[in-house]
Image (cartoon, grey):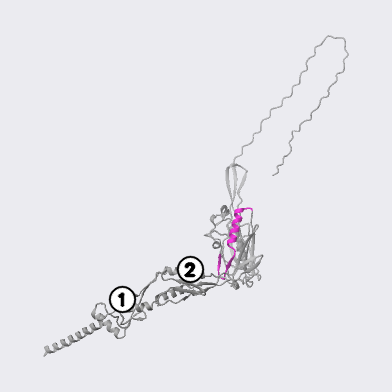
Amino acid sequence: MKKSVILIAFSIIFVILSASILYGHSIKNHDKIYENIYIEDINVQNLTKQEALELLKEEYKYEDINLVYEDKLWQIKLDDINFKHDIKKAVEDAYSIGRSGNYFKDLKKIMSLRQGSIHVINIYREYNDEKIYEVLESIENELNKEPKDATISIVNGNINVTQHEIGYVVDVDNLKEAIFNELEKRKEFEDIKIPMIEKEPKFKYEYLRKIDTLLGEYTTQFNASVPGRTENIRLSSQRTSGIVLNPGEEFSFNKATGKRGLTEGFKLAPVIVNGELQEGIGGGVCQVSSTMFNAAIYSGLTITDRRNHSIPSSYVDLGRDATVAYGSIDFKFKNNYNNPIYIYNFVSGNKITSRIYGSREDKKQISIVSQVVQTIPKQVQVKNDPTLEVGKEIIQDQGRDGYRVETYRVYPDGKRELVSRSFYPAKTMIVVRGTKPVKPVQQPQQKPQEKPKQEEKPKQEQKPQEKPVEEKPVEEKPVEEKPQEDTQQGDSQKTE
């Protein structure tokens, strides 16, 4: 009995398997693409490979891509960008569905397709991105219009502001996306409208018109006969001028001038090094920063970085100088107003002037007071010099007193605002004192004067008496008396 049941079961299984094999063979054994297979959005079911290929050629008719802006046209030629689309491979991929060689796996896939499952094949496309970017760059060069800032200038003391211009630039990111979408998804290319972005200028006319008055100014004098120093003042004045400072922005002197070397046009002139004047590059630049420091104080601006010289300056009072050294010491101030300010420096003759313009609502009547809070007397150092005679002294260095100074900004209501503290160290006075002994001067001994000997008159011989002869008077010739020379010399004067 059991053997009969087992035999019947095996028979049934055999029949089912045989039927399945025969059915599967029947549905697999044809040369057409199976049901519900698509190449992108085109249904290629029940088509031979050749039929599917011809259908795709009809559907995908690629031409050049047109990029349009107003009345201008640019073309992306498919050959130029090496565009390729492999529809033949897409047909082969579609035909291979259900024909992997694994009988049961293929049978399962075919049955799934017949029951409504969809399989989509994408067409492989290839193109050269760099070639597309070259086309876009040429479009940008032709269409891009950079915005034009409003400008401000000072002419004969008047504030002039020019109009701004809005700019337009190609929206490259969106344009690239549109081109790639066209290449990847379209059967037929459509014209692409070039998207543009409006670009605002940094400074608009209405904004700069807020600068309508002089907030503060300051002028210092220099010796224009020193060419190197004069050129340094002119150059640094020029490079720190014509600057618009927005609310909250900070001005940096070193940033404005840039590196100050010979290659940048700066000259050799006296500079202060370790409290001593030496020849160096950029001498005179500190007079510009000091002049601007005073203009900024008068304008009511916040001083954020300032250091005084080690030696008091001749062109400003104590506490009102600002030294700079590129890379280490800077002079900075911040626009603490809600309106823009404009920095304008100029050199005229032997004067450097710094002016700061701003809004009338920010103008204040400010005065500056520098107060010496401590005077530090200079010390005196005496050096002995064995080569200098005793009793003689030479001042080798005059030295100078030192000072501690506080600088205040004073408002009309009497309010005093501390702007800065300055320290000028004292310099020792050096006196050279002689220690060489002085030898006594020996007076020469005078010999006693001998009395002049009187000449003896010759004795007259006595002649025998003769007859007296009458003598004629002898005429004496007058002797010309020479005047004596004056041996005393008068005082001589030297005219320089």
Q: Is residue 150 magenta?
A: no
| Residue 346 figure quarter | bottom right
Q: Earlier in the sequence, mark 2 or mark 1?
A: 1
Q: The disc labelled 2 sits on which kind of residue?
A: Ser
- Foreground: 60 or 382? 60
Q: Do we see residue 219 in this rendering?
A: yes
Disc 2 packing (10 Å; few <14; some 14–19; many ≥20) = few
Q: Nearer the viewer, residue 160 or 436?
A: 160
Horizontal relation, residue 104 to residue 473: left or right? left
Magenta highlight on residue 232: yes
* Residue 249 percent across, percent down from the top left: 55, 69
- Would you name the residue on which mark 2 appears? 138
Q: Residue at x 66, y 67 (%)?
A: 158
Tell me the quarter of the picture where residue 458 sits: top right
- Mark 2 vs 1: CB contact within 8 A: no
Identify residue for label 1. Answer: 92
**In this orientation, which residue lies closer to the viewer: 46 or 368?**
46
Q: Does residue 62 lie above or below 480 as drawn?
A: below
